[in-house]
Amino acid sequence: MHRFMNPPVDAVLQHPPKLHIRRMGRADNHALPVVMLHGAFTGSLASWWMTCAPRVAKFNPVVLYDLRGHGLSQRPAEGYRLADHLDDLARVTAGLGPCALVGHSLGGWIAIEAARAWPDRVSALVGVDVPIGAKRPRTSHEAAEADTASKGTPRARRRHHQLTLAETSFRSDLAAEAPLDVADLASLRCPTLMAFGRQSPFVDGAELARAALGTNSVQMFDGGHALHLDATADLSDAITQFLSGPAITTTTTATTSPKGTAEPDHAHG
């Protein structure tokens, strides 16, 4: 059902907002598909494509996509609440069956909310330096800079992307959301790994994650917020080892789109 092609294949989900997706990895009908979600502002699927995704794709089919407002996906003027992002993720994962979600920063927040909302569809979850317990979601310029750690994106392109998102409701929509807390993490039913950078501004979330999920569900890495750049090899190994664990299963009873979402639109290359 999820036999992917190699080399990678790009496509666009046409129903608004248009979403740019990339499929890569081994052609295996039995390995668990992995959907990787990037962080905010200057992030795009390239943040995984250029770092951990090729390593994960040696073992699992991988789906990457640009979040709405990012990369090559459409940038609507409004509609950046978590519910909107979940609708997009439902479109991306429609037809995959059970899958694992790997998300960095905002992508991790979306992945956590998806795992809570669709427990019968998400078989495993990896959150990478996801802000937890903040007084409000970190949507400031400071957080945008932290999201890339001033490394992966040239300054002019980073500034252009921040300015274009500033013309949307992105900041205000996320600022209106309640931040993640211990109770949110404790409600997760799937096997979960939370990764944090020791030099990250969000490192305090590691203790909250341990309180909610247990010590074995949290791993620390040398690096800042952009762990996929700072600790590519170690983070990739942690993800692949976690996904190959005995607690991870590809079986599920759900084969349709998550409740409350539309049926998938067709992807065109």
Image (spheres, grey):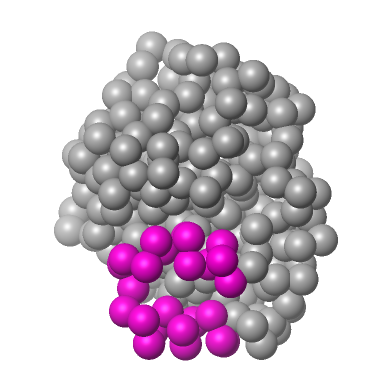
Q: Is residue 120 above or below residue 127?
A: above
Q: Residue at x 29, y 49 (%)?
A: 230
Tell which of 164 and 110 is nearer to you: 164
Residue 208 appears anywhere in the view: yes
Residue 145 belongs to magenta span: yes
User: Which quarter of the rendered picture does the C terminus lie within?
Assistant: bottom left
The overriding secondary structure of the stretch rendered in magenta is helix
Reply above or below: 11 against 182.
below
Give how far across and how far down residue 92 sits, in percent.
52, 56
- Between 260 and 175, the residue placed more toward the observer is 175
Q: Tell me how many marks there are.
A: 0
Q: Position of residue 266 (x, y in %)?
A: 51, 66
Q: Is residue 68 left or right of residue 2?
A: right
- In the rendered image, which quarter contains the N terminus? top left
Nearer the observer, 176 or 89: 176
Residue at 56% across / 66% down in the picture?
Answer: 142
Membership of 212 in magenta stretch: no
Nearer-the-camera pick, 70 or 227: 227
> Does 96 sit left or right of 157 as displayed?
right
For image coordinates 57% across by 54% down, the residue present is: 106
Q: Is 20 located above or below residue 261 in the figure?
A: below
Position in image of residue 237 (x %, y %) = 25, 32
Q: Is residue 152 left or right of residue 72?
A: left
Q: Residue furthest top?
A: 246
Residue 127 seen: no
Which residues lie in the magenta part?
141-164
Residue pictured at 47% horizontal, 15% vertical: 216
In x, y percent, where is residue 159? 46, 84
